[in-house]
Amino acid sequence: MSISPKKFNTYTFFKLPAAWWSGVRLQHINQESAVATVTYKWFNQNPFNSMFWAIQGMAAELSTGAMVSDQILDSGKKISMLVANNNANFSKKATGKITFTCKDGALIQKALEQTIVTGEGQTFWMKSEGVNEDGLLVSTFNFEWTIRLKK
């Protein structure tokens, strides 16, 4: 495991400042899952007294992308990654602390193996679910990640 939450959160300060200043933080990461949190505050609100959807999207994407980054680092290969597509569903107002969890880490390894063996780019979908402090689902995000060997 190359990435720790502390290292990744420091990285966000320099390379993803909008996420860092909005309060998005990686809490946990391993090969199978990652957890990111964000807390509703004045600076990440919308006019409806809840968290702006894009802030939720940053936390959700971080819970998927951190695992992709980590497994690419572990592969030792030069591989690019990019979100090609995404969709989301919002089921409840996001207030308080929202925890986004992705448990799709196994999908990454399979795609990495394929792109390394074949040299062809791969795509795969990963889901991140955001729950509030009461354990109620507030939003679900799906991200289509693309990876390919760098030339």
Image (cartoon, rainbow, N blue to C red):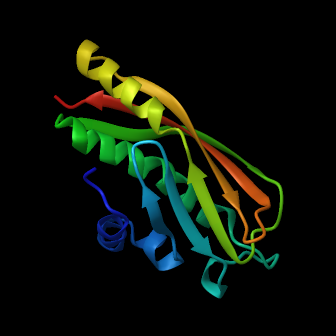
Residue 139 falls left or right of residue 120: right
Residue at image location 43% in from the left, 48% down from the top: 65
* Residue drawn at point x = 70 percent, y = 72 percent: 51
Q: Give the image location of residue 14, x and y in percent.
A: 30, 72
- Left or right? Give the position of 141 relative to 75: right
Residue at 47% x, 79% y: name it: 21
In-front residue for pair 114/48: 114
* Quadrant (top left/top right/bottom left/bottom right) for the C terminus: top left
Q: In the rendered view, does 81 fall on the left or right side of 27? A: left
Between 70 and 119, the one nearer to me in the picture:
70
Tell me: 3 left or right of 67.
left
Q: Position of residue 95 (x, y in %)?
A: 75, 75
Q: Residue at horizontal 46%, vertical 33%?
A: 106
Q: Considering depth in this image, is 100 or 119 the residue closer to the camera? A: 100
Relative to 54, say whether 64 is above or below. Answer: above
As drawn, 95 above or below 89? below
Question: In the image, residue 33 lies at what x, y percent?
Answer: 49, 47
Quarter of the view holding residue 110 = top left
In the displayed structure, would residue 52 be above or below residue 112? Answer: below
The mark total stands at 0
Location of residue 129 in the rendering, given as x and y in whole percent from the top left corner: 66, 51
Looking at the image, the residue that sits furthest to the top is: 118
